Protein backbone atom coordinates (compact mmCIF):
# COMPACT_ATOMS: atom_id res chain seq x y z
CA UNK A 1 0.00 0.00 0.00
CA UNK A 2 2.92 2.36 0.59
CA UNK A 3 3.96 2.09 -3.07
CA UNK A 4 0.47 3.05 -4.25
CA UNK A 5 0.47 6.05 -1.92
CA UNK A 6 3.90 7.11 -3.17
CA UNK A 7 2.76 6.82 -6.79
CA UNK A 8 -0.36 8.86 -6.10
CA UNK A 9 1.75 11.57 -4.44
CA UNK A 10 4.11 11.53 -7.42
CA UNK A 11 1.21 11.91 -9.87
CA UNK A 12 0.14 15.04 -8.02
CA UNK A 13 3.57 16.67 -8.55
CA UNK A 14 4.36 18.94 -11.52
CA UNK A 15 5.60 17.30 -14.71
CA UNK A 16 9.22 18.47 -14.40
CA UNK A 17 9.50 16.79 -10.99
CA UNK A 18 7.97 13.57 -12.33
CA UNK A 19 10.49 13.57 -15.18
CA UNK A 20 13.35 14.13 -12.73
CA UNK A 21 12.17 11.22 -10.55
CA UNK A 22 11.80 9.00 -13.63
CA UNK A 23 15.30 9.88 -14.82
CA UNK A 24 17.02 9.20 -11.50
CA UNK A 25 15.05 6.00 -10.96
CA UNK A 26 16.02 4.65 -14.37
CA UNK A 27 19.62 5.79 -13.83
CA UNK A 28 19.74 3.94 -10.49
CA UNK A 29 18.33 0.72 -11.95
CA UNK A 30 20.79 0.93 -14.85
CA UNK A 31 23.68 1.48 -12.43
CA UNK A 32 22.69 -1.60 -10.44
CA UNK A 33 22.51 -3.72 -13.60
CA UNK A 34 25.89 -2.35 -14.71
CA UNK A 35 27.42 -3.20 -11.32
CA UNK A 36 26.18 -6.80 -11.55
CA UNK A 37 27.53 -6.99 -15.10
CA UNK A 38 30.96 -5.81 -13.96
CA UNK A 39 30.91 -8.23 -11.04
CA UNK A 40 30.17 -11.12 -13.38
CA UNK A 41 33.62 -10.74 -14.94
CA UNK A 42 35.39 -11.35 -11.64
CA UNK A 43 33.25 -14.42 -10.91
CA UNK A 44 34.76 -16.29 -13.86
CA UNK A 45 38.01 -16.63 -11.93
CA UNK A 46 40.29 -14.72 -14.29
CA UNK A 47 41.79 -11.40 -13.38
CA UNK A 48 40.72 -8.30 -15.24
CA UNK A 49 44.13 -7.91 -16.93
CA UNK A 50 44.02 -11.48 -18.21
CA UNK A 51 40.47 -11.02 -19.50
CA UNK A 52 41.39 -7.80 -21.31
CA UNK A 53 44.55 -9.33 -22.80
CA UNK A 54 42.57 -12.34 -24.05
CA UNK A 55 39.90 -10.11 -25.58
CA UNK A 56 42.51 -7.94 -27.31
CA UNK A 57 44.30 -11.01 -28.68
CA UNK A 58 41.05 -12.44 -30.06
CA UNK A 59 39.89 -9.13 -31.54
CA UNK A 60 42.75 -8.64 -33.98
CA UNK A 61 42.49 -5.36 -35.84
CA UNK A 62 39.44 -3.11 -35.48
CA UNK A 63 38.18 -3.70 -39.02
CA UNK A 64 37.99 -7.48 -38.73
CA UNK A 65 36.44 -7.19 -35.29
CA UNK A 66 33.74 -4.87 -36.64
CA UNK A 67 33.02 -7.12 -39.61
CA UNK A 68 32.80 -10.19 -37.36
CA UNK A 69 30.44 -8.35 -35.01
CA UNK A 70 28.13 -7.29 -37.84
CA UNK A 71 28.17 -10.84 -39.25
CA UNK A 72 27.29 -12.31 -35.88
CA UNK A 73 24.47 -9.79 -35.52
CA UNK A 74 22.88 -10.89 -38.79
CA UNK A 75 23.28 -14.57 -37.88
CA UNK A 76 21.53 -13.92 -34.56
CA UNK A 77 18.69 -12.05 -36.29
CA UNK A 78 18.29 -14.88 -38.81
CA UNK A 79 18.11 -17.46 -36.00
CA UNK A 80 15.52 -15.39 -34.14
CA UNK A 81 13.32 -15.12 -37.22
CA UNK A 82 13.70 -18.57 -38.72
CA UNK A 83 14.27 -20.52 -35.51
CA UNK A 84 17.21 -22.31 -34.06
CA UNK A 85 19.34 -24.64 -36.09
CA UNK A 86 17.72 -28.00 -36.60
CA UNK A 87 19.53 -31.17 -35.60
CA UNK A 88 19.29 -33.97 -38.12
CA UNK A 89 20.12 -37.49 -37.02
CA UNK A 90 21.59 -39.75 -39.64
CA UNK A 91 21.22 -42.95 -37.62
CA UNK A 92 18.28 -44.18 -35.59
CA UNK A 93 18.64 -46.95 -33.08
CA UNK A 94 15.52 -48.87 -32.14
CA UNK A 95 15.51 -51.05 -29.09
CA UNK A 96 12.84 -53.45 -27.90
CA UNK A 97 10.83 -52.03 -25.04
CA UNK A 98 10.05 -53.66 -21.73
CA UNK A 99 6.45 -54.77 -21.67
Image (spheres, helix red, strand yellow):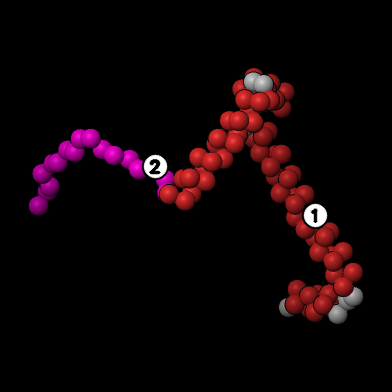
Q: Please state the horizontal and vertical placement of residue 87, each as a whole percent of the image.
A: 33, 40
Looking at the image, residue 40 sits to the left or right of residue 83; the answer is right
Q: Please state the horizontal and vertical placement of residue 32, each as a whole percent of the image.
A: 75, 50
Range of residues picked out in magenta: 83-99
Q: Are circles 2 and 1 on residues that touch, CB within 8 Å? A: no
Q: Callout 1: few (<14), some (14-19), or many (20+) C-alpha neighbours within 10 Å?
A: few
The quadrant where residue 92 appears: top left
Residue on which the image places disc 1? 27
Taking the magenta stretch, the answer to whether it contains residue 14 is no
Looking at the image, residue 49 sits to the left or right of residue 44; the answer is right
Is any atom of residue 54 visible in this view? no
- Observer-nearest of 2 and 19: 19
The quadrant where residue 45 appears: top right
Residue on which the image places disc 2? 85
Q: Secondary structure at mark 1?
A: helix
Q: Please state the horizontal and vertical placement of residue 2, each as a whole percent of the image.
A: 77, 75
Q: Secondary structure at mark 2?
A: loop
Magenta stretch: helix, strand or loop mostly: loop
Taking the magenta stretch, the answer to whether it contains residue 88 is yes
Tell me the residue at 12%/48% (across/down): 98
Q: Callout 2: few (<14), some (14-19), or many (20+) C-alpha neighbours within 10 Å?
A: few
- Observer-nearest of 98 and 64: 64
The CA span between labels 2 and 1 is: 38 Å
Dot 2 or dot 1: first in sequence order is 1
Looking at the image, residue 21 sits to the left or right of residue 29; the answer is right
Question: In the rendered view of the protein, which quadrant contains the N terminus?
Answer: bottom right
The quadrant where residue 65 appears: top right
Tell me the residue at 60%/34% (across/down): 69
| Dot in front, 2 or 1 | 2
Tell me the residue at 87%/73% (across/down): 15
Amino acid sequence: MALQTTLENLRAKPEHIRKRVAFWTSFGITAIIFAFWLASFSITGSTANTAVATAVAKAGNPGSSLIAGVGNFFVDIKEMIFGARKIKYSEVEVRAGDR
